[in-house]
Each structure stands twice: as C-alpha cells, then as structure tokens.
Image (cartoon, coloured by chain):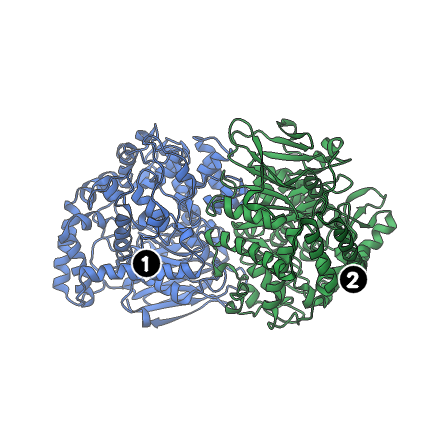
Chain colours: A blue, B green
Amino acid sequence: MDKILRIDVSGARPSFKEEGLGEYAGLGGRALTSAVVNAEVPADCHPLGPENKLVIAPGMLSGTAAVNSGRLSVGCKSPLTGGIKEANAGGQAAQVLAKLGYAAVILEGERSGDDLYVVRISKDGVKIEADSSVRMLTNYQLAEKFKDEYSKNGSMISIGTAGEMRMANSTVAVTDPEGRPTRHAGRGGVGAVMGSKGIKTILVDGAGAKMLQPKDPEKFKAANKVFTEGLQKHPVTGQGLPTYGTNILTNVVNEAGAYPSYNFKTGRYKDAAKISGEAQAELETKRGGNPTHGCHRGCVMRCSGVFVDKDGNYVTKQPEYETVWSHGGNCGICDLDEIARLDFLDDDYGLDTIEMGATIGVAMEAGLLEFGDAQKAIDLVHEVGKGTPLGRILGSGTGATAKAFGLERAPVVKNQAMPAYDPRAVKGVGVTYATTPMGADHTAGYAVTANILKVGGEVDPLKAEGQVDLSRNLQIATAAVDATGMCLFVAFAVLDQPETFQALIDMLNAMYGLELTADDVSELGKSILKNERDFNARAGFTAAHDRLPRYFRREALEPHNVTFDISDDELDTVFNW
Amino acid sequence: MDKILRIDVSGARPSFKEEGLGEYAGLGGRALTSAVVNAEVPADCHPLGPENKLVIAPGMLSGTAAVNSGRLSVGCKSPLTGGIKEANAGGQAAQVLAKLGYAAVILEGERSGDDLYVVRISKDGVKIEADSSVRMLTNYQLAEKFKDEYSKNGSMISIGTAGEMRMANSTVAVTDPEGRPTRHAGRGGVGAVMGSKGIKTILVDGAGAKMLQPKDPEKFKAANKVFTEGLQKHPVTGQGLPTYGTNILTNVVNEAGAYPSYNFKTGRYKDAAKISGEAQAELETKRGGNPTHGCHRGCVMRCSGVFVDKDGNYVTKQPEYETVWSHGGNCGICDLDEIARLDFLDDDYGLDTIEMGATIGVAMEAGLLEFGDAQKAIDLVHEVGKGTPLGRILGSGTGATAKAFGLERAPVVKNQAMPAYDPRAVKGVGVTYATTPMGADHTAGYAVTANILKVGGEVDPLKAEGQVDLSRNLQIATAAVDATGMCLFVAFAVLDQPETFQALIDMLNAMYGLELTADDVSELGKSILKNERDFNARAGFTAAHDRLPRYFRREALEPHNVTFDISDDELDTVFNW
C-alpha cells in the first residue's frame, strides 16, 4: 500500500498516473484523505469545480489480516457543508484496493464534456473508458451490469443517479461480500464530487492480489487474536450488534427520551417498539432473512443483515438504526417493510439515509405530505432519484429543503442533518454535532457511549457537565480510528477494555514496524482534526458555525423537558487540548 | 420623526407600542436599520425565526422639503445571505411615514398560527387586523384592493406571494405616486422576513400629516435650492437619467465590454442596442408611455418611467437598467416587450429583478430552457410566484438554483446575485461585490462612476490599481447617503460638484440644528459599515466570504480577455481606514 493513483479528468479524456506516497507516507484512511484535501484543495474552491478532489483511501490496517479493517474513507470539500469532509463506508473495496497496493485513489481536474467513465483497477493496471450505457443507472443496476467483473474477487465503487446529478445529498456506494451496493460513504454529498468528475463507477478486481504482510508477523497475529477476543467478549460488539444490528438502539434511545420524533418535535416515539432492532431481527429470522451478517469479509461483529419480504425475497440490507430512525420515528412511519423499501431506494439512487429521512421530515413539516405517509415518502425519494424539480430540492438536503419552503426548523449543523440522537437529551452528542468539522455527525464523537450506554465511563446525558470533555476525547479517538480502517464499533470494546486498545496499537506497530504509544495515537487523532479545522477556517468557518440552530435552545424536548444549554463559551473549548 | 412603532406579532394577535428613539436618536435610513439589527437581532438567529426583526426606516431628510429624499430603508438579517441587510426603495412611503413622525416601524416577535395581517397607520393611530382575503394576493392585486385607502395621500408597503411564501428572493414593495407597487426594497429576501411575521400589507395614510420643518428654515431652503440646481446641471442627473432612465447604461456598459451576457460568459451582448435606454425611451414615447417620471413626489431627476404596450396600455414601470440586463442580455433576450412583461411579473409577485434574472440565467445554463427563450422565462417567473416545486428552487435565489442543479457557475457573493456589471471588466465594482457586507451589490459602492462614467475621478476599469481605494471611499459615502433618505443617484452630482455635496450637508445641519462637516458625514458612513461588519462577523462571516467565486479568476472575459486579479490581500484592506 505504497502507491497513490491519480486520475485526472482534464483534457479530452481522463488520464492517470501512479506515484509514491511522498509527504503522505504513513497515513491512511481519514488521516490521508484530510491531509490531501487540506494540502491540495484550495479551501475557497467550489465543491463541484475543477479544484476540488475526491480522495478514496483504505485505512492503515486495510488489506491485512486484521479483523474489521475494511473501512474505506472518502474525502473532499463537501458540496453539502462547504467544509472538509471524510465519510467512510464498509464493504469490500478497502481491502481490495489495499491489497492492490493503493493507499489512495484521487479523482482530480476539470471534466470536459459530459461523458461518463468507468475505471477498472486490477493487478494488471488501470483502464479508464467512456461508457454511455451507464448514464442514469442506479447502483443496483450498475451492480447487475458489472457483477461478473467484480463480484467474485473484487468490489464496485459507484454513484447512483443522485451523484451523477451532482446533488448535495449523494453518496459513494461500495459493494458488500455479495456484490450488493449496500455500504455507503453517505454524508456530505461525496457522490456529487465523483459525479462532477464524470466517474460513474470504479471496478476493483482483487484477483491475484495478496494480503498485506506485517513487518512482524508473529506479533501481528498475536495482537489480532487479542483484539478479536476483545470484540467477541464485549457485550455490545459480541452480543448486541451481532444479534440485532445497530437497530438495537431504537428501544434504548427511545427509552432515554432522546429519540427525535416528528422532525425533532419530541424525544419519544409511541411506535418505537414496532421498528426496534428486536422486532426487525425477529421479522428477518421468521422470513428467512439474516440479522447477523458482515458488511465485509473479516468482520467478527457482523452487525449488518439481510432484509427480505414476506415471500423471502431480498429487499435491502438490514436497515441501520439511523436509517430506521430517519425514515421511521422522525417521519412518524412505523412499518419496517416501508422503511426497508426506503432504505433500498436510498441505496439504489445513492442517497444518504440520514439526510434523506431528515429532509422528508422537514417536507412533512412544510405540509408536502402528512407525518406517517409512507407511500408519499417513497414517492418523494423517487422524485429525488429521477431529478424532478421537487426531487432537486429534496436532493439538495435538509437545510436547502427548509429554505425552499421558508421554514426555520431545519435540524442541521453546517447544513448537514442531525442523526438519530436529539442533542437536547444526549448532550455529549450535541457537543459533537456542533463542533465537529464534519457538520452534524454522530460518528465523529459518539457520546452516546458514556451518555446512554455506560461504555467508556458515565456522563449524565441531560446535564451540561462533562459533555465537552467527553466529546473532545471521543472526537480525537474517532479521528484516529478512522485512520486505521477499523470499523468505528471497535471503540465499544476499545473504550472499556485496555487490553483491546493495546492490541489495536500492537497491530499497527507490528504491521509497520513502529513503536507507537497510546499518546501517539491520540496525537494522530489531533493532527487529523487540526488539518480539518485548518481547512475549514480557510473556507470561512468560525466559532459561529460551531453551534446548533437556536431553536434547540428555545424549544424544550419531551419527555425530559430539556433544551440544549451548553454555552457557546464551553463549546469553544472543545479543541483546546 | 421622533417615534419608533414596534409591532410585536407574538401572542394570539399582533400588538404594537410606540416609543422614543432613545439610543437611536439622530439616526435614519440605513444608519438606523443597521443599528437596530446589530443591537437587537442575535447574529446567529435564523432569518425566518422569531428573533429576527424587520426594520423599516425613512431617511434623515425624508418628510422634509428636500428634493429626492424619498428612500425607504428596510433592514433585517437576510434570508438570502445570512448576513445583515439593508435594501432601500423609492416610492411614497418614506415621505408619509416621516411626516407621520415615524423614524422606524419594526416588525418583531414570533408569529403564532398562519393568519395574515393588514396594518393601517395614519395620524389617528395604528390598526392591525387579520384579513384572510389578502392570502396569496400579488402586489398589484393588493394595490387594486386597497387603493382607495392610500392612493390619494399615502402609500402601501406590501409583500407579494414570494414574500408570503418566505422565499429567499422576495421584496418589500412600495407604491409610487400613482399608487402602483413599482418600487422595491429588492435585495436579500427582506420580503420573506415580513412574510415570516405574517404582515402582508402596511397602509400608510398621510392625510393631515404635515411636512417636517427644519430648525433653520432659511438655511434649509437655500441649501435645497443649491442642491436642486446641482442635480439639474450635472449631465448624468440633469440630462441622462431624466431622458433615458437608468437604462442609458446598456450601451455604455456594453461598449465598455463589461456587460455580463449569457450568465456571465461574455462582456458584450450582440443585441444590446435593441434593449438600450435609447431604444426604450423611443418606444415608450412613440406608444404614449412616459420615459421621464419620478418614483416619488419631490424627485427632480425623474429617472423612472411608464412602459406601455403597442396599444398604449400600461404594462409596467419603465424597467431599470439592471432589470433590462438581468432578463435581457444575461438571458440572451432582446425584446423590450418581453423584458417589460418579466419586470411586471417580478413586481407583482414581489421578486428582486436582479436575483430573478440571474437565477433564470443559471437555469438556462442548467438546460431548463434555452438562452433567449423569453416565453419560457416568463413561465418560470409564474412558477416562482405560484410556488410550484420548480418555483421554490428558483425563488430561493441564484446560488440555491445552481446548487440544486449541480452547477459551479453561480455569479453570487455571499449567496446574492451579482448585478449588471462584470467584475472582471469593472474591477472597482468587483471589489464592492466581494467586500460589501450586503453580498454582491452594485449600489453599495458604485465604482462604475470612476471606472466607466468618469464621474468623481478616473480609474482604469481593467486594471487592479486604485480599485480598493475607490471602492472603500464609495462604500463609506454610500452608507452615509443611504442614511439620509436621498436617492443614491445624487452621488453623481455630489461626487463631481463640491458645492452640491456641501448643500447636502447644509440641509442636514439646517434640518437638525447640527454642525456636521464632510468628515462627520464620512464618519457616519464608517459607523454604519462598522455596525454591519460587526453583525456579520458574529454571524460567522470572515475574509473568506469577501471573495468572488473562483471562476471569475479562472475564466477570462471577452472582449478584453480579463480575469478578476485583485489579490485577496488587497481585498482585505478595504475596511482599513
């Protein structure tokens, strides 16, 4: 993993070159994407203009024997937030790219004309070809078209119609072990940047590519064993996630009164039980689906799954907690089949499920449809995927939709929609939403851990005390984890079990012949955040952007009757370390 | 003019109170609106939320015998830019409000329900009544409905359907001497803020209201005489504007190669002569319209006019240069009748003509219609006025439209569309676009004067040298003029003729019993800009926002083959005084 593949779309047709890592040596995943974007993309450029770049990077442990190391980071200047963006996805591509030796694939330059291109990467080299037949294909249509090329040994990275239309809500999709485009670098409109470069699909063929070998194989193997055991013995990663998937959180967060319902109007949803992970797993099992499945080979947590209809036919991957929430409780929809249908459409058109569901919630508040109207919600997603005028509004995201309909109540930070945790009742997450360089993003500092799950400590979710420290520490740790290619869920075990954390460090050291300490890992996280904040500052972001919308301070949330009451001054200390 | 009328829309129905000027004593127009907004509106609030306020203020000389003192300032946090906004309009309202003693009318508080209200202000007091019959009426429909109440002695301030729907492109309309809603505080979506307060119409009845008396009547009268003579003898204000209106600029700017055509693709428009002020005035005269008309009583420049159809029937007021440009050359439309129709529709629905035309130009680039397709352009404006999904996109402004269709080429600064002067070929205006707190706005520092018209000096429009100084001085002077209630066009005479400038100062001194010097007037301008920049800084604006879109640096403009080449460092010195 010592090469960067640069694909320049300027000129009559795209060209490519391969080069060494140079100044980026030693970086992977989010550390690499944020370093490249900060160094090479002018902060004041237009996200869809020629100066922006799309950086696709496996993590530092991707392509090795390390379990759960299959995350693929996708970075750029975000069309949604206008700031730096790293979104990452599971699926097979990170492993394959890493095994082929690529630390990053960078799409850059100015597209001429409107041809669409298919990129093929294998051990035999790189091919880039114009292909008019892919125009306005969805992700599942692309998967069907190209499955023979990648499904056995490789993976497909692609954009659906949303990315092709350069919508601010558009994802980069990655196929799973079954070759389905179910894993998405979802947030921030990364798909639109790929679309702006005219690259529709990247087919990565791993045939003949070998697993990456550690500098110290014995030490690596031993550490990987300890790490795996750590994941398997922790109740969240060893039991909760495998059995129920991420949707196990519905009942938990709803019980905590932090489940944003009806466009963030209340913190409890009366029909939460109907769409809970327990109900979902039971339904899947009964129908012959599968609630326990890995999104990439080498995963031991297997929190993904397969959702089938009443006849046992594939509908979509098991919808994640945030998806079930965004289209479910947030929209007053309590039917798992309807939610699964929405999940499929989001994946197929290439839409971020969080942003899409939050957008529909705003559309409901605007009166375009009633809360609870699942069929109309499905119709709306089709409008987005087909690019009708209404679809263009909704595809521009939650903030743009609220603006188009003249509403204040847009649950966004830096124009990105808040996920499935109300910041008034999980205040640590509120701090993360407000301050992460990414825009509202639970994964950037998942304070649900100590706030609700009692993992990695315990901080009262309803009080202001301790939330800034909690979010700061999690944001640093998360940035580091996002550099490794590890699934973020390893954090549950890493936070609670010192030996699991040490095993992760040991793997990095064994792989690269390093002597990193826990402090070094923390420094890595800080350096990533520093790059990201540096970019954002030059793009015009200030402390004024590290805020929640005012109505979260004004409107109290039932059932705890809480507002977001962490002061601006406190928020401004998050990055004082 | 010693009262502020505060209308609070909170509670079951709006209430009002009158109070003294207090800390705002001595301020008028833009000085007053920007002071109130900066002091009372939290910079981080949502423009359509309860914390925003709409401040409507006549100028310091409004309501007096001073000629051309009929500008009405409208201020708020802008729904379009997210920064502070002052937009001003001619028409009758400023004079009448001033004569009734109101230095400002402030709409504030949180609207409950969706009732719409009509406010009536007369010497007998203030009445506020819910009126369901005004819902989704256009400005001309409102004028027809209420004409008996205001057309003889008063004025109507209103929002069309765009403001009622809280669109980011929506104006506050003011009626002219004939009672027509032809004068608009156009820029920045001020109409949406009025809409967010549920106030559809303010009827101002001047019956029995007396002209305001100066502290020193003789001195005032003498100064007004010198001032009037100054306007009448200057070639621009005494001849060009009365004869041809503002559209006299079409040939001038086109000849200079600074006429942005086809969505800012080229600086000359082949059919400019067909839509020039000369052609327009000739057509109006031939048909029995009127090219020489004042937008309010007491105007001696009379640059407005009346546009009639071939049968002599009223179509709209004489479209301004910027309107003829935005819907004309910018869209490749060269038919004055079609442009007049578009102007009428903009006024009727309550849309800023600059923003609307620039938006249609972007829609043309997006492929929604062909450049030059006037009928389709008219259809699009109807979509906006009726609030269809496509209309919601376009009504959200030029930047939002480009975003919805995934285009980089949005000619906006701070999300507000650039007017009719290409910043690459009139670089002083480019500096103003980039740096004014208002977003791209020619009126904020009209460097066309020295760049092209050779008024107030001479600075080569194609070179970087001298533009920052020029823009700085004009921005300061303009802010001061905008405080007086004077039409900005007095600046042509004021800049060239020292005695005309002195007469303006003399009028202020005679009116208020002051001893202002030219330096004091400059200090007033600086203090206004300081308020505005203070607000914007707290709203999150930085130097990164004082920039043109990068493509103005990348793409050269024909015929002079120039890019915008004033460095960021230079731009950052504009407010160093």
Provide the residue designation for mark 2: B234
Residue A558 seen in this snapshot = yes
Q: Quadrant of the C terminus of chain B?
A: bottom right
Left/right of residue A428 with respect to residue B332 in the rendered view? left
Left/right of residue A167 with respect to residue B461 in the rendered view? left
Left/right of residue A260 with respect to residue B226 in the rendered view? left
The picture quadrant where one finds residue B272 is: bottom right
Q: Residue at x 34, y 39 (%)?
A: A424
Circle 1 Cα neighbour tier, 10 Å, few/some/many (<14 / 14–19 / ≥20): many
The picture quadrant where one finds residue A190 is: bottom left
Q: Nearer the viewer, residue A308 or B261?
A: B261
Residue B132: image location, x then y, percent: 62, 27
Q: Amino acid at mark 2?
A: His
Q: Which mark is residue A529?
A: 1
> Against A532, is A356 above or below?
above
> In the rendered picture of this protein, how many numbered marks are placed on residues?
2
Residue A70 seen in this snapshot = no
Residue A137: image location, x then y, percent: 47, 50
Q: Nearer the viewer, residue B419 or A241?
A: B419
Q: Nearer the viewer, residue B276 or A511?
A: B276
> Against A216, is A283 above or below?
above
Q: Secondary structure at mark 2?
A: loop
Residue B500: image location, x then y, percent: 74, 60
Circle 2 Cα neighbour tier, 10 Å, few/some/many (<14 / 14–19 / ≥20): some
The picture quadrant where one finds residue A272 is: top left
Mark 1 vs mark 2, foreground winner is: 2
- Pointer 2 chain: B
Residue A481: image location, x then y, percent: 26, 55
Q: Amino acid at mark 1?
A: Leu
> Against B461, is B388 above or below?
above
Q: Quadrant of the N terminus of chain B?
A: top right
